[in-house]
Amino acid sequence: MGGGVEISEKGKNNVEDIEVMDTPERSKNRQIATPISKFEESPVFNFLNSLSPIRPIKSIHISQSINPLSFASLGSVFTSPHVTSVRESRFLQRHQLSDPSKPEFSTDDQTTVDPENKNTVNVTVQSDEQKENVDQRESDGEPSYDCSKFVVDFPEDYECNSPKSSIKAQEMAGYAGNSSELVPFVVQDCETNMEGVIHHADQNNEGPSCDWDNFLIFESPVVDGREENMYTQPGDGTEITDNAGEKTDYEHLSGLYRGMRRRCLVFEMGGARRKHLDESSGSGSDASVLLQSDDNNTSSNDHKLLKTTKLPGIGLHLNALAATPKEYKIVNPQDSSTSRRLLIRPSSSVDFHTSNPGQELLNNSGPVALSLEGETDSAQNAVVGNVANEEINPSSPKKKRRKVEQAGEGDSCKRCNCKKSKCLKLYCECFAAGVYCVEPCACIDCFNKPIHEDTVLATRKQIESRNPLAFAPKVIKGPDSVVEIGEDPSKTPASARHKRGCNCKKSGCLKKYCECYQGGVGCSINCRCEGCKNAFGRKDGSCAIGHEAEAEEDEVEMNEKSMLDRNFHKNGIENDHETNMDPTGLPITPLRAARQSIQLPLSSNKKPPRSSFPSIGSSSGFNARQAAFGGPNFLPPPPKFSKQLEMVREDEMPEFLQDGSSSSPIRGIKLSSPNRKRVSPARSSSVETSTGGLRSSRKLILQSIPSFPSLTNNQ
DNA sequence: GAGTTTGAAACT
DNA sequence: CAGTTTCAAACTC
């Protein structure tokens, strides 16, 4: 991408430049949000405000803001996966953060994590809050991107943004449509944040610097002259290096800064990075080493960042998410578990998952993150080395799995036991989830590893050719769980649905055999199940829990579908949101990484769900569900599919953009015949996805529709 | 831990 | 498209 180039060019630019680089979301939010200032005064707003550590300076558009996020960058989404990735990252971040259960959140001393958490305080409120934060940031001139998380915590303390930012943000709104442009922006946002911080530090060595020190725990050996050299880029370096005398203090900052920027870069520019990685020689054994070797500042930056954050899973993938609290603290970059990468192709479409800066920050597996896109040979090798264990030691898969489960790892971490499929079929959870198999896996003859990237990608393509939505999330969650904040929490969110529906005959949709149940969603008319007793909602519309919502949803869904169709005809864009999947097949893996979970209601399982989702991704949906099921204690097994829910839409969008004709919303709409045995994935999925999105945010959708025109216009 | 059940995925 | 087979997870003992 040109993003890299732009970045370097703009590197000099300080806050101002960065500020200028408004994120697409931001711009959109701004556009959409402005009218919504009225929400500030709403009780909900107040509530959220109370929850949020950050003081809302600007009006917060709760409901609408959500839309922007979810739909937000239609243009961007369509245009570039990168942009979406960023957005996705937000979602991920939110979810992760949102989960209260996680130790991370609970601990105050978490230097790196907590800050972020602050950013995304409550899951239920998350989107709103985030928006608030975003708004604030916008108002403050702070970049809204995930990469800016660091800054986010310190918004007040570190107000590096120049007033110009707000003004420029508007200007930037025009960019929303252009992905290529957006990417750089994102990167810059990251940089900007950091720069802003740095500037601030320069100006005020005192306060902020101290905080940063605490915040930034740079373990990385990398902080040395060499690194300095590596990182010094035009502009960036200047700021950091300018204060030679104070260099010591800034090293951390610079490292962080660099790391952030790199992260952005990395995610944004998978291809470039990949190249670099390939070039990098190899000390492949250690991912961190690889990173360092990486020619771009980015790699080293990430490395630093990763180390700095010390949170596992920075790259965030499923692995990262899966990491147990312990793992988080003990982050071992080399640990294969952490090193799992999404099976994303270097291509843009894939980048989504990589782009979860937020998560990355949260989760430390920096090297992992790199590996995601990188797939560099060396990187691969490094990863491979880690992964090799899996292949070599397939023994006691269940044991491992259980162990992991017990450890509290969530869905985010897939662990398969494939023996015959070579982990190249959808039978393999890892493969299906778009992630490489990792150590915990007990698979045999596994080809789902970075080493076999080509094979994996080829296989993926093949499968996708067969079923474009094969890798799409099976359960579709509402555009934003937050959406339903206003609704009665006791009701089942019903924001999620299984795209294709299940075909259960004996399990009564009460066991994890049922994808719907596993995904924590109710069965719908799309299901061909027999004797459905799904606790989340029965096919017939009755729902053991929150059936009201369920039934309501169905109705709404139908209405929505019709609405959507109409709207689609008009705009032709909306679908994109909901429909994901890159035709190329590059998944949305990143999204999957998110694997937010909607937790199952009391699962019959005594054991923790195989892929028990750590509480990381508690989504609003989850919360609602939780409430519905009886509160915090209720921890249903994490849905296997929910993982990808949030990001899905965005991911899917590109495809539609590319091929709008192929999946017309209309076509999809009438997918569901109750009795149909199998729904053609493409249709059903597209439709369902759209509907799913609608459901979750049906109210929003209606609202959001109007906003689209503006977005498109910008483009 | 081994074996069974289940339903999705894959195949025909 | 329907039926069958394969597969691996979920589950039971």
Image (tube, coloured by chain):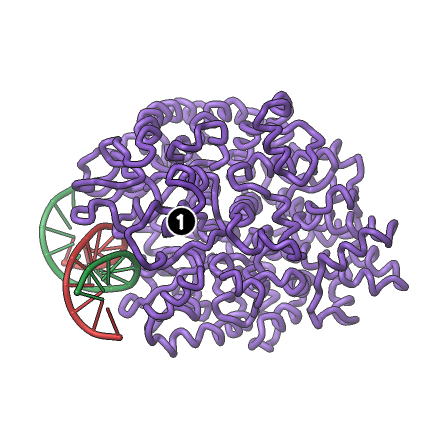
Chain colours: A purple, B red, C green
Q: Position of residue A602 (x, y in %)?
A: 33, 47
Quarter of image, res A314? bottom right
Q: Is residue A138 left or right of residue A508?
A: right
Which quadrant, please, contains the C terminus of chain A? top right
Where does the image place residue A344, in percent across and percent down from the top left? 47, 57
How many marks overall? 1
Residue drawn at the location 30% of the way across and 55% of the way down:
A605
Q: Disc 1 is attached to a residue of which chain?
A: A
Say what secondary structure mark 1 lies in.
loop
Residue found farthest to the right: A245
The location of residue A562, given as percent across then percent down, is 35, 23
**Front one among A169 and A339:** A339
- Please tell me how crowded label 1 is: few (under 14), some (14-19), or many (20+) other residues with Cα within 10 Å: many
Vertical arrangement, residue A674 with respect to residue A372, above or below? above
Of A232 and A98, nearer the camera is A98
Determine if residue A510 is in view. yes
Residue under label 1:
A635
Q: Is residue A194 left or right of residue A287?
A: right
Residue at point 40%, 49% (across, down): A635
Residue A637 percent across, percent down from the top left? 37, 52
Residue at left offset 65%, top offset 41%: A144
Quadrant of res A49: top right
Q: Is residue A85 visible?
A: no
Residue occupying the point 57% across, 31% down: A65
Question: B12 above or below A61?
Answer: below
The three-letter amino acid code for the residue at tag 1 is Leu
| Quadrant in which residue A343 is drawn | bottom left
In-front residue for pair A595/A30:
A595
